[in-house]
Image: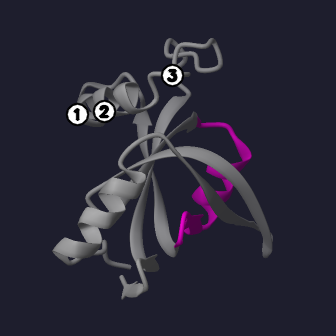
């Protein structure tokens, strides 16, 4: 699977629609059984980013099979789930800062323990999708 490269118009729509705190549906597989949950996500440059726990069921399922399904406002797609590791790692500072800003309304509500090295960033690299906007359909 190769990371998606969107045309300029589709990228602008994706950024406008999902380049902020956005709730999306994320589907994984557990022994061939689909598991779907809503997650807060932030979109940038062909990928969604999520703060999660390394020991969560979604991460166990992604470790077994990294192919995921994604659905959001007038968007459906597939991608590859990639753990970027601990939120506080220096190499994650570029996206961690963006996530802190995007999720500012709730990020410090006590739900997320940033001292726990199991608090990680999950990257969902898009591999294909379909985006609908103002009567146009974009095949990604």
Residue 3, above or below 56: below
Where residue 105 is drawn, which disc sits there? 3
What's the residue at 31%, 56% (across, down)? Answer: 15
In primary-sequence order, the first of circles 3 and 1 is 1
**Residue 93, percent across and down?**
26, 28
- Look at the image and give the residue range highlighted in magenta: 53-74
Dot 1, how many residues are within 10 Å of its Cα: few (below 14), some (14-19), or many (20+)? few
Circle 1 sits on which residue? 94
Residue 48, above or below 87: below
What's the residue at 38%, 86% (across, down)? Answer: 136
Mark 2 lies on a secondary structure that is helix
Residue 129, above or below 14: below
Dot 2, how many residues are within 10 Å of its Cα: few (below 14), some (14-19), or many (20+)? some
Mark 1 lies on a secondary structure that is helix
Circle 2 sits on which residue? 98
- Contact, mark 1 vs mark 2 (Cβ under 8 Å): yes
């Amino acid at each position: 699977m190769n990371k998606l490269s969107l045309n300029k118009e589709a990228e602008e729509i994706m950024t406008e629609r999902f380049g902020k705190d956005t709730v999306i549906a994320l589907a994984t597989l557990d022994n061939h059984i689909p598991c779907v949950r809503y997650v807060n996500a932030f979109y940038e440059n062909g990928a969604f980013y999520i703060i999660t726990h390394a020991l969560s069921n979604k991460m166990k399922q992604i470790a077994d099979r990294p192919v995921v399904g994604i659905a959001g406002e007038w968007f459906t797609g597939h991608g590859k789930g990639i753990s970027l590791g601990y939120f506080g790692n220096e190499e994650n500072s570029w996206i961690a800062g963006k996530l802190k800003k995007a999720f500012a309304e709730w990020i410090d509500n006590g739900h997320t323990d940033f001292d726990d090295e199991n608090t990680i960033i999950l990257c969902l690299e898009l591999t294909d999708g379909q985006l609908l906007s103002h009567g146009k359909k974009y095949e990604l």
